[in-house]
Every structure is written in structure tokens, then in C-alpha cells.
Amino acid sequence: MDYCKIALFENVSPAECERMMHCFHAVNARFPAGAVICDYEKTSGRLGIVLQGMASLIRTDKNGSRTILERVGEGGLFGECLAFSGNPDAIFVTADTDCEISFITYDEISKRCSNACLCHTQITENLFRLISEKALGLSERVEVLSRRSIRERLLCYFNLCAYHTKQNVFSIPFSGTALADYLCVDRSAMLREIRKLKEEGMIEMDKRQVTVHAMQ
């Protein structure tokens, strides 16, 4: 994958990208679909860059119930917020598809290199920007989960998707089961609400493609 297409390396030249990956002692690894990429109960302080595939950041509670915190596609990062928290709890990253991941330790980015090069400074600035964007995403997640009913959570999530894509037809990154996990609701109950919304003409849904006809 072209590192220059990764948000962490925005405004960094191709040659500098290659040099910085060597400077950061990046380690690449491949994972089959369904594998645990990173378990933050055992490992922390690492940033993962998805070079290929799709991964999910998942939290599990003491009863074994799981919540999808985030989906990360090609060029995306995971772990930067966790690296700052120091409290990983039961949080791990799994491969939704076959994945290739490049790992960098947070210390390699945060420490000043001996040359104090401009590209290192740019990457550090990019990292903090990405953390801010991640915080915004989490606030939107709170907005969705603050809705009391399954119907309200679905509509809130769909409306946010429409807002970000700037169109009322979009694709969601979730299967039915994953969407239920993301919304923290029962899958069967969620499917019933989706069916009702379709019958009322508020949405159309064909697999992962959604059309929103009524904004709330």
C-alpha cells in the first residue's frame, strides 16, 4: 500500500514515508479473517495501520457481551486512543477479513528523533489530529447510544451516515449481526424495527446499502 495515502503520513513525501517507517522500526504482520490482531489486556502502546483488509475494535464486558467500538479500513489506524488511556480493559482488535497490519510503538512516534526532522514533526501533528477526529467519532457514538429505543438508534445512526456522505443513499460497513453489536441491541429486535421502517417508507435497505427517505 502507498504509505502516502495513509492519513498518518499526510503532507509527507513518498521518500520520507519510507524513511520514517524504517525510523519507527515498523513491523508488518498478516492475519486471517477472524483472528485477534491485538489484545489490549496483554499488549498496549502500539499503533496499528491497516495496510490491507478490514478490522474491528471490540470491547467485551464481564458477561461476555461484545460491543463494536469502531471499524477500521485500509489506511486507517487503531490503538492511538488506547495508547494514551493506559486502561485497556477487555478491548481487542479482530480481523473482519484477511488483513495486513503495520505496527509502530507509540514511543517511536512521540520521542524526538536526533535529527528533529520536519517530517517527524508533521507525523506527530497528524497523529494528534487523528486523535481529535477519533474523539469526535466517539461523541457521535455516544449520541447514537443515548437514544432509548432501537428505532431511535437506527434512525440516528442512518442520519449520521447520510450527513457524513452528504447523500441519502450510502453503504454501511456492518453485517446485520455487527450492526446490532454496534448499536448494543438484540439482532432480532433490530431486524423487526428495520422491517417496520421499510414498511413505513422511511428507509430502503438492500443488504448493506441504505436509502433514507425521512430524516429525524
Image: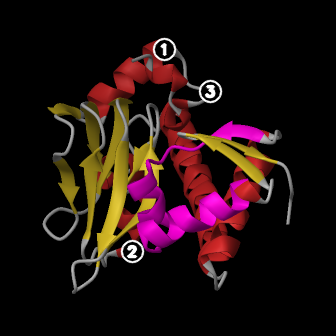
Asked which secondary structure carries label 2, the reply is helix
Label 2 packing within 10 angstroms: few (<14), some (14-19), many (20+): few
Q: Where does label 1 land, which residue?
A: 14
Q: Are marks 2 and 3 in contact (CB under 8 Å)?
A: no
Q: Nearer the viewer, residue 57 or 179?
A: 179
Q: Is residue 14 above or below residue 5?
A: above
What is the number of the mark on residue 162? Answer: none
Could one spot residue 136 in this view of the protein?
no
Image spot of residue 23 (x, y percent): 30, 31
Image spot of residue 45 (x, y percent): 28, 60
Q: Is 76 on the left or on the right of 148, as rendered? A: left
Residue at 59% over, 30% down:
10
Q: Where does label 3 land, which residue?
A: 11
**Quadrant of the drawing holding the N terminus:** top left
Magenta span contains residue 31: no
Asked which secondary structure carries label 1, the reply is helix
